[in-house]
Amino acid sequence: MNYPIVIYPCDEGGYVAEVPALKGCLAQGETLSETLGELEVVTQLWIKTAEKYGQPLPDVEGAIQKVKALSYSVPH
């Protein structure tokens, strides 16, 4: 599944990345590459856990629309 992600720098260095559609699914790392690699791992674990317990996965298209709406609400 290709959920949208949000990446932002940390004040103390490094990055944080999250999948807003998957509550609590986030990762951090010193480099962008490391952060994205960690996010891939936790995303797969999040999805496997949801499937194991019969939880429905959020709709990808709905998640994309939500992130788009949030990005338009940020002052430029």
Image (tube, rainbow, N blue to C red):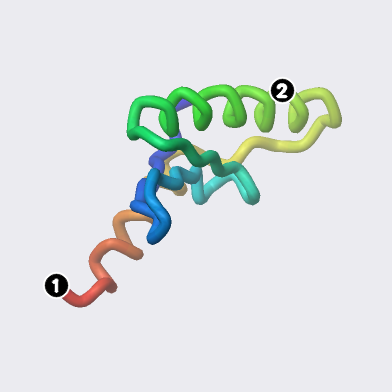
Front position among marks 2 and 1: 1
Residue nearer the viewer, 8 or 48: 8
Disc 2 secondary structure class: helix
Residue 54, by quadrant, is top right
Residue nearer the viewer, 75 or 35: 35
Q: Residue at x 59, y 44 (%)?
A: 22
Instruction: Tell me: 71 left or right of 34.
Output: left
Give percent across and percent down for residue 38.
52, 28
Mark 2 and mark 1: span between their CA atoms? 37 Å
Give percent across and percent down for residue 36.
42, 29
Residue linked to disc 1: 76
> Three-letter amino acid code at disc 2?
Lys
Give percent across and percent down for residue 71.
28, 62
Q: Residues within 10 Å of mark 1 (few under 14, many from 20)?
A: few
Q: Which mark is residue 48?
A: 2
Q: Residue at x 60, y 42 (%)?
A: 25
Which residue extends farthest bottom?
A: 75
Label tally: 2
In the image, is residue 60 above or below residue 67?
above
Which residue extends farthest front?
A: 12
> Three-letter amino acid code at disc 1?
His
- Looking at the image, tell me whether mark 2 or mark 1 is earlier in sequence order: 2
Which residue extends farthest left?
A: 76
Instruction: Tell me: 14 left or right of 20.
Output: left
**Quarter of the image where the C terminus is located:** bottom left
In the image, is residue 4 above or below residue 46?
below
Residue 35, by quadrant, is top left
Give percent across and percent down for residue 68.
30, 56
Disc 1 secondary structure class: loop
Q: Residues within 10 Å of mark 2 (few under 14, many from 20)?
A: few
